[in-house]
Image (tube, helix red, strand yellow):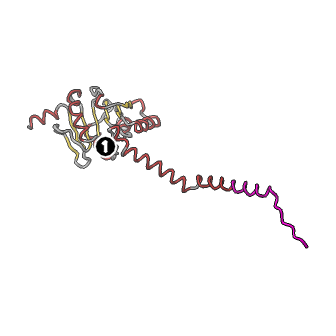
Amino acid sequence: MQLRPTRWPLSLGRVERSAGASGEGNGLGNIFLSPYFIGGAVLFVFAGAVAYFWLVSFLFGAGYQGAPRRSVEAMFRLADIRPSDTLYELGAGVGAVVFPAAREYGAKVVAVEIEPLRVLILRLRRAVGPGAERIELRRANMYALDLRPASVVTAFLWPGAMARLRQKFENELRPGTRVVSRCHPIIGWTPTQYDRAADVYFYRWPDAIATSRSGG
């Protein structure tokens, strides 16, 4: 008896190749939909946002550091914020001072910020909460800003920035204007009060400079 070789249909190879391709496609899709991939993507985006806030934002001369609520409340208490006040917040960040001052104390607030991502966050927060009519957002260079309308100026800035602002304060602030700085004093000025626990300096213009000169 003579054996004949078995001939497989050509279509079988095509089916196997098609099945293999389909399996590869499903496998790739499963990778993208896996919780590990999604979690890794979220972590990557979060790490990028943190790196931007802490590193890249220094390109704008605006390194970020949040202000604890205790310090913010001390700033308001020392400055005696009232609805009649116009408060300029220099380096507004994401609004730790801006929104409580407008929403809880009723002041008119001018929030000055140069860094674009923080400006976007400020706009979103103003849009979704009360008191928007009392909050003015300015993406501006604070050193070129006219401070004469302010009755209160608040800041949480680096020592170099406070040193640059001193001459501007002396040239533009109206008598009686209150200045509040967290962590960093205005060199050459004498604070009216200093809250050691919150690390907040309170000055009243022009008393701060007059006291410094008389003390010297």
Q: Nearer the viewer, residue 137 or 22?
A: 22
Residue 37 x, y percent position in the rendering:
54, 54
Q: Is residue 111 above or below residue 70?
A: above
Q: Residue at x 76, y 57 (%)?
A: 13
Q: Is residue 150 on the magenta stretch? A: no
Query: Quadrant of residue 215 in the image?
Result: top left
Q: Residues within 10 Å of mark 1 (few under 14, many from 20)?
A: some
Residue 212 x, y percent position in the rendering:
12, 36
Q: Is 30 situated left or right of 56 in this image?
A: right
| Amino acid at circle 1 | Glu
Residue 177 x, y percent position in the rendering:
23, 31
Task: Name the residue furthest right.
Answer: 1
Could you tell me which quadrant the C terminus lies in? top left
Q: Is 159 situated left or right of 28 in this image?
A: left
Task: Name the residue furthest front.
Answer: 2
Q: Is residue 5 on the magenta stretch? A: yes
Q: Residue at x 23, y 43 (%)?
A: 184
Question: Badge 1 is on which residue?
Answer: 73
Residue 89 x, y percent position in the rendering:
32, 35
